[in-house]
Amino acid sequence: MAQIQWGTKTPGHIIYLIDQSGSMSGANEQKAAESITAAMMDTLTGCIQGKEVRNRVYVTIIGYGNENGVSVVKEGWIADFVNELQICKKNNSTIIAPKSYGMTPMAEAFALANKCITTWLSQRESVQGDYKIPAPIVINITDGYPDNANEATAEAQKVMNIVTRDDGNVLVFNIHMDDSANQVEIKFPTTKSVLNGVPEGEFLYDISSEMTTDFIEVARAQKFEGIVPGSKGFVVNAKGDTLVRFVTFGSGVSQH
């Protein structure tokens, strides 16, 4: 269960799903893009050895709900993004353009993630030989409910049910954005009852993986409290800096 440390001989794969539907308009679309940028900068730092950036992490960013519907916005080894991330740091910009348009085709986004993961695992099995293959990680960033919750649940669970050759199931983490003062932020719940019937929360709870031992330690390093075995990799009504810390946490097991 995502226990294999990521390295040059055992590289990991992170898939970011970013909600770019119309409801993300305004602050949320900017915050989501910023969180992925910050997480990739952190990942890049963890892949530097001496003066060289090692290919320890492969990144795929899938946008859903923009004018293109669902598509791979960017993908490549973290080393491929060095120049872009340097520009982002210099200009205080983001690795992807903030966008918000249309509906929320989350089911299709998870289906595309499934294809990306399946292709990645097949490729790694053919080139890694006896070296172990870590379980990929999916981080879904959204502010609301999908177009079809049943279809989205089914597609997300297909991803969660992918079993890697050496490292257990693919992990899916979700973060729900809502800065409203009247909504309580709930982090890493162990039971659905604490969500108080919030539809977005209950839906995302069902498609979030339980935290592994490694991720519990990484989350604690990110100053998240109250995490115990059985906690789900999931936050509802994220506020303040929780979004960036969560996305960075989800991308951080490679550096553990």
Image (tube, rainbow, N blue to C red):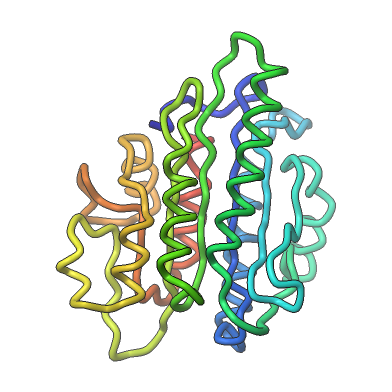
- Where is residue 72 shown, x and y percent of the image? 73, 57
The vertical placement of 156 against 235, above or below, is: above
The vertical placement of 91 against 180, above or below, is: above
Looking at the rendering, which quadrant does residue 196 occupy? bottom left
Is 174 in front, or is 57?
174
The vertical placement of 147 against 115, above or below, is: below
- Where is residue 112 shown, x and y percent of the image? 64, 53
Is 224 in front, or is 23?
23
The residue at the far left in this view is 193
Q: Indicate the quadrant containing the N terminus: top left, top right, bottom left or bottom right.
A: top left
Looking at the rendering, which quadrant does residue 116 occupy? top right
* 97 sits to left or right of 14: right
* 85 sits to left or right of 165: right
- Residue depicted at x 50% and y 44%: 252
- Residue depicted at x 56% and y 29%: 6
- Residue depicted at x 45% and y 78%: 144
Is 75 in front, or is 7?
75
- Where is residue 186 shown, x and y percent of the image? 27, 69
- Where is residue 178 shown, x and y percent of the image? 41, 81
Is 122 in front, or is 99?
122
- Residue depicted at x 81% and y 44%: 80
